[in-house]
Image: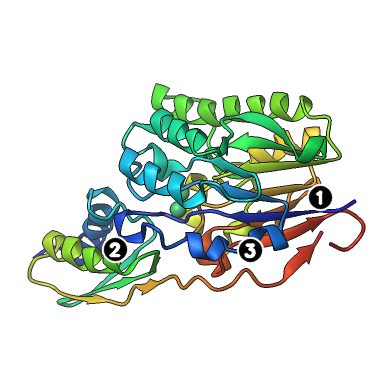
Amino acid sequence: MSIRVAAVADIHLGEAQRGSYRPHLEGIEERADVLLVGGDLTRHGTLDEGKIVAEEFRGLPVPVVFVLGNHDYHSDVEEEIIAVLREAGGIVLDDTAETLLGGRLGVAGGKGFGGGFAGKSASEFGEPETKAFVRHTREIADRWRVALKSLDTEYRMVLSHYSPVKETLHGEPPEIYPFLGSYLLAEAVDAEGADLIVHGHAHAGTEKGMTPGGIRVRNVALPVLRRAYATYCLGSEEC
Amino acid sequence: MDTPHYVAARVQQALAEDGRTNELGIRVDVRGDQLFLRGQVTGDDQRHLLTEVAQEAAPGLTVHNEVTCVEVRDPGEEEQL
Ligand SMILES: [Fe+2]
Ligand SMILES: [Fe+2]
């Protein structure tokens, strides 16, 4: 049986947007079995903004899975933001995996990171700062492999903030691609297999792309979608 | 007088790093004494803050804020994968 996945990212809620996103989620259970939210939940990454986000998604009739984005790290309270999202009933992935819908869907992921794309990417070489940047992405990709391996479900998805591929960045200045994602993320998912990868972060990017291994990638950043969320049907039968 | 190129870079950094905005995707162009902001934000309050921060980072220039607010429409059609 097919499943329906709703996804959005980069909602960037601040004090002025309190209560503004919730009305768009009305009736989501008619359209989707699960909602994935791909980071940049807040603007400045404060705990107050984190609480606004948590209230926005509290008590929805479908499970909600979050990862954080770079904005959610800005005030160094990411752990506290994760805690308030969980307290409100959300599932938060931090390079981990979760099984949902009675074992039918597995979602792995986390915020991801940058570094660039094959042939034009940064390497773990030279100054400690450069090495640390690239190592951060490499370690994340390694944890995603472990997370994906742990899933034994009918469908498998990856939720990220940063992009695993270039295609969904189309529209962004190529000079900043290394700050928008890394091929190491796609390589990890291609090695373990998944049905779909969703990400955000690239506000000026494009919705649809694919990994070199043929896994569909969707950039669900709100400014790209221009709609409350996208809905994808996984499976051979129509939803 | 500052080179327009560096003024634009300074304003873009200010928009990203100033705690009022933290807005990373804004395009900044300087033409003579006119400064143009382009891009998208998620709230109208954020648009006004961009003008404020840009004006402080480039005093003496006239700021034209052409940034738009993302409109959120209904979810629409699903995609079969
Ligand atoms: Fe964002
Ligand atoms: Fe981001």
Give residue A66's position: percent from left, percent from top.
56, 42
Q: Give x and y (percent) for residue A10.
A: 48, 54
| Kind of element beneath mark 1 | loop
Depth check, front residue: A153 or A212 = A153
| Upstream in sequence: badge 1 or badge 3 | 3
Residue at mark 1 to residue at mark 3: CA–CA distance: 33 Å
The 10 Å Cα crowd at callout 2, few under 14, some 14 to 19, many 20 or more, is many
Amino acid type shown at disc 1: Gly
Residue A170 seen in the current view: yes
Label 1: chain letter: A
Compute the Cα span from label 1 to label 2.
38 Å
| Subunit bearing disc 3 | A
Seen in the picture, residue B74 relative to A40 is either above or below; the reply is: below
Residue sitting at x 32%, y 46% = A44
Is A108 situated left or right of A4 in this image?
left
Q: Residue at x 70, y 27 (%)?
A: A147
| Chain on which label 2 sits | B
User: Which residue is painted at 69% across and 41% down in the image?
Assistant: A158
In the image, B49 versus A2, the foreground residue is A2
Secondary element under disc 2, as helix, strand or loop, is helix
Left or right: where B37 falls relative to A229: left
- Report the amino acid beneath label 3: Gly
Query: Is residue A58 found left or right of B1 in the rendered image?
Result: right
Say which amino acid is labelled 2.
Gln
- Name the disc covering residue A214, or none: 1
Q: Name the colour scheme.
A: rainbow
Residue B46 is marked as 2
Q: State the image coordinates of residue A222 (x, y, percent, origin top left).
A: 52, 62
